[in-house]
Amino acid sequence: MSDIATQSALVIGVVRETIAGEHRVALVPEVAQKLTAAGVTIVMQRGAGTAAQFPDNLFKTVEFVDSAQEVFARADLLLKVQPLSAEEAGLLKVGATHAGFMQPHNHLAAVQVLKDRRITSLAMELVPRISRAQSMDALSSQASIAGYKAVLIGANALDRFLPMLTTAAGTIRPAQVLVIGVGVAGLQAIATAKRLGAIVEAYDVRSATRDQVKSLGAKFIETGVTAEGAGGYARELTTEEKDKQQAVLDARIAVADMVITTAGVPGRAAPKIISKSTVEKMKTGAVIVDILAENGGNCELSIAGETVQHGAVRIIGPINLPAQLAYHASEMYSRNLFNLLSPAIKAGVLSIDWTDEVFAGTVLTHAGEIKHEPTAKLLAHS
């Protein structure tokens, strides 16, 4: 990999997302103006921002075209939300650059096309978790939306108030909310449930989250199990640790009115934390919102995109929660992209410094090679 990769006469392309239920757009008017001021040309598919409440007339510095194919054909740098399909990757110019979520382990055919066409791809989920890259961390920005929305979904499904209310008919006790997993989504779920007036408990296998939970006014559940992992994530627990953790959690789940589950291990299916037998011990009318349902679910009974009624308990498995707040999700994601790319855009030219640890950590494919080792291994064995 050379120290500097350079493109001239930069054309940035943005297409309308085609995955069902995806309402976000990779570029919002505010960021489009900043990029144009940096000397680039922006070509956008007509209606790309409409579903996110950004109609075409708000983009004052953008050239609109009717077809996605034209955008792909002209773009030196393509910005997108959902991962490229193999067919879409094949429409990009040889040697072009692409930035967006890639989910390479689920889209190996597209990765192969990107490699073969010598496309530089920057995977937003690979942005290093370092202080300097916080403003570029799209996983965190979108996870915060998911945590917020999960509580609203749960509150809407719950047949009782979240806050304590004093009324002429007597006092209504506040609901008890349990948040399992204290990453970005979990922290936002805690904060949202507290703002709505619930009594909130939270648990994470990483003991370092204890102070974060307490700072939001929630109670941290102590199980005697910790699982600090690399990069601020949790490691997988041993069988003995899981059993010890489960006994404590099951008791807290049984008394909760709402449970929000957000516990995940990078590159693996979501760990099963709530079993069928545990659900059967829950309160009548309790609700589980499993935001990991798309990745197998933290609850044994979760089904992605569906609400399962098991006895008197509802298990909700929402999918693509950030797309349900598409306006702000798009704003945040577009800013993440801008913060990542703007240091490499100078006078309308894209110059990526591969000695920069942010770009070196974010790159998936470049110059006909797969730079992300886990993906390279997966593709080699596929």
Image (cartoon, rainbow, N blue to C red):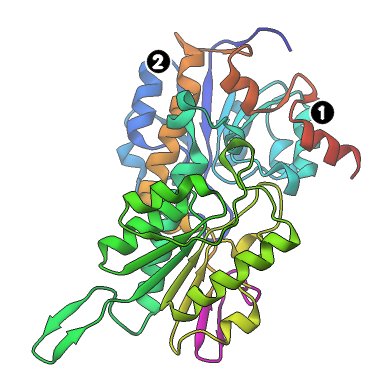
Relative to residue 77, is residue 343 drawn left or right?
left
Judge the density around disc 1: few (<14), some (14-19), many (≥20) Cα neighbours within 10 Å: some
Q: CA distance from mark 1 to mark 2?
A: 31 Å
Hey, what amino acid is under mark 2? Ala
Residue at 40 percent across and 40 percent down: it is 332
- In the image, what residue occupies the spot 64% across and 20% down? 360
Stretch of the chain drawn in magenta? 300-315
Quarter of the rendering containing residue 77: top right
In the image as oriented, which residue stretches furthest toward the right? 381
Element at badge 2?
loop
Task: Note whether residue 25 is visible.
Answer: no
Q: Residue at image x 38%, y 29%?
A: 32
Residue at image mark 2: 38
Where residue 378 appears, x then y in whole percent? 84, 41
Q: Is residue 259 magenta?
A: no
Q: Indicate the position of residue 168 as horizontal and vertical percent values.
A: 8, 89
The disc at residue 239 is none
Q: Residues within 10 Å of mark 2 (few under 14, many from 20)?
A: some
For marks 1 and 2 on the same chain, the one whose residue lies earlier in the sequence: 2
**Is 89 situated left or right of 21 in this image?**
right
Vertical placement of residue 312 versus 39, above or below: below
